[in-house]
Image (spheres, helix red, strand yellow):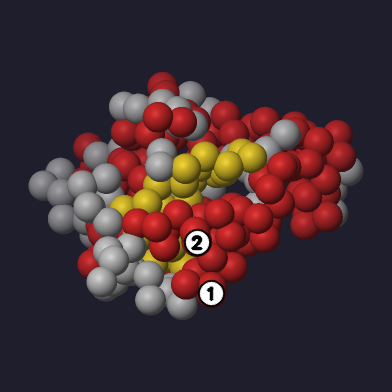
Amino acid sequence: MCTQIISISREFGSGGRLIGKQLAARLNIPCYDRTIIQRTAEKSGLSPDFIARAEERARSRFHLSAMNVNLGSAGGKGGFAHPQEVPISHQAFFAQAEVIRELADEGPCVIVGRCSDYILEDRPKLLKVFLYADLPSRVERCVEEYGLPADEMEKRIRRQDRGRSNYYNYFTGLTWGDMRRYDLTLNTSTCGIEGAVQLIAALADLREPQG
């Protein structure tokens, strides 16, 4: 059985969620994606919808720093001395980071997105993967999944990628998609879903201690 934690970062529409699920099934370990949202909502008192759309809302670094509400009225329970002074985006990120660490403490797993490569970077058994793809293949995959016209999906893909980049860069101080940050980067337009699963699983196997 795999003994590692695998973090999958991805461009929108590159197939990251599906790859994460299939990889976890192959390695017989849990895959965490939407679970993180629900557990973060429970921990922070914020709505699952707000947490799920945090990256989408990240229109700019200024926008993230300016998102400030009275968390007392929002049901926040993060334990801050003055919760009304904590930007809601930060409250959500801190709660999410705590959830991700808790999940990693439970054992080997696949974690999709949510800055997990940064949050868990001190873990010696962390395998960091970044998935990308060309725009036409991402549009095609998203049109099939969401049923929207191709021109609308192209705009959504660009907006989602911009949000993910703003969100990641703001909270980590690093650069989203910088290939030097990852152990493996894959173009899913070239290798496909199954190919990506096989390649990541092969690298995980190579990193396993040999008895």
- Disc 2 vs disc 1: which is toward the camera? 2
Residue 62: percent from the left, percent from the top? 41, 22
Q: Which residue is nearer to you in this view: 91 or 138?
A: 138
Q: Earlier in the sequence, mark 2 or mark 1?
A: 1
151 or 122, which lies in front? 122
Q: Secondary structure at mark 2?
A: helix
- From the viewer's perspective, is 68 left or right of 51? left
Q: Is residue 21 above or below residue 6?
A: below
Q: Quadrant of residue 101?
A: bottom left
Amino acid at dot 2 = Ala
Q: What residue do we see at 40% from left, 29% from top?
A: 180
Question: Is 135 left, or right, of 76 in this rendering?
Answer: right
Q: Which mark is residue 201?
A: 2
Where is residue 51 shown, x and y percent of the image?
45, 52
Dot 1 alpha-carbon crowd within 10 angstroms: few under 14, some 14 to 19, many 20 or more: few
Mark 2 is surrounded, within 10 Å at the Cα level, by few (under 14), some (14 to 19) or many (20 or more) other residues, namely some
Left or right position of 205 against 55: left
How far apart marks 2 and 1 lie (CA) works out to 11 Å
Residue at the outermost front position: 211
Quarter of the image holding residue 38?
A: bottom left
- Residue at image coords 37%, 52%: 127
Viewer can see residue 57: no
Which residue is labeled 1 in the image?
25
Q: Residue at x 83, y 55 (%)?
A: 144
Give the SS element for disc 1: helix
**Quadrant in which the N terminus appears:** bottom left
Identify the residue shown where x is 54% and y is 33%: 163
Q: Which mark is residue 209?
A: none
